[in-house]
Amino acid sequence: MIAFRYLLNGRLDVREGTIRSTTDLDRLDGAPQGGGAANDRLHHEAALRLTGAEQRYTACRRALVDVMSAAKRPLTIPEILAAAGGVTVSSAYRNLTILCEAEVARRVSGADDLGRFELAEDVSGHHHHHLICSSCGTMADVNASDKLEKAVAEAARQAAEETGFDVKTHRVDLEGLCPACR
Ligand SMILES: [Zn+2]
Ligand SMILES: [Zn+2]
């Protein structure tokens, strides 16, 4: 359990809270992501981006980043709330919007209308693709293979040549049925 303090609605009300996410989400989604130094780098990058957007890296935003970092898939707002104990719905919406505007996080759209959130890839340092369940909408991160990355890079090069489009990144979604829905 990681203890943290958060500002309720970013104002005066300061309380103690706990992140249950680290254990809950790890159990749900597999092994924990790299600790210590990687985590420091991640928070440093998040703080830089928020500063660039003239925003502060509040304890609440830090807690949201921790929750997204511990997950192995994009999370819905209810999932984020369940993991970041004590954060209110309105506070989660507002702070996730700010994290997205500062390009610390991004909203991922899938097979349903629920918004899901994950850390920006250049913040997490983890390029990946998504498995999307077309029945329940759940998403899972899947590692990108070298072979696929090479093929996509070649496709991007060709597209750039033919269209003058400057390709910066790509997204690969694999859609189907998750084990629970099969
Ligand atoms: Zn499913
Ligand atoms: Zn890729």
Image (tube, grey):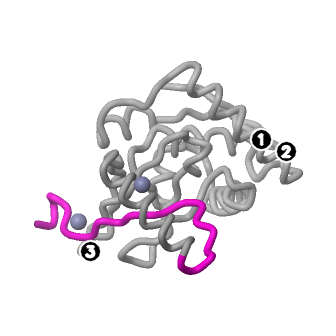
Main secondary-structure element of the magenta-colored stretch: loop
Q: Residue at x 46, y 38 (%)?
A: 70
Q: Which three-letter amino acid code belongs to the residue tagged 2?
A: Thr
Q: Crowding at label 3, few (<14), some or many (≥20) Cα neighbours within 10 Å?
A: some
Report the span colored magenta: 162-182
Q: Earlier in the sequence, mark 2 or mark 3?
A: 2
Which residue was labeled with disc 3? 134
Q: Secondary structure at mark 1?
A: loop
Q: Is mark 3 within 8 Å of ligand 1?
A: yes
Left or right: where 33 falls relative to 69: left
Q: Secondary structure at mark 2?
A: helix
Left or right: where 156 falls relative to 53: left
Q: Which three-letter amino acid code belongs to the residue tagged 1?
A: Tyr
Left or right: where 72 falls relative to 86: left
Q: Earlier in the sequence, mark 3 or mark 1?
A: 1
Residue 136 occupies quadrant = bottom left
Q: Residue at x 67, y 59 (%)?
A: 100
Against 166, residue 66 (above or below) is: above
Left or right: where 11 falls relative to 42: right
Mark 2–mark 1 CB contact (< 8 Å):
yes
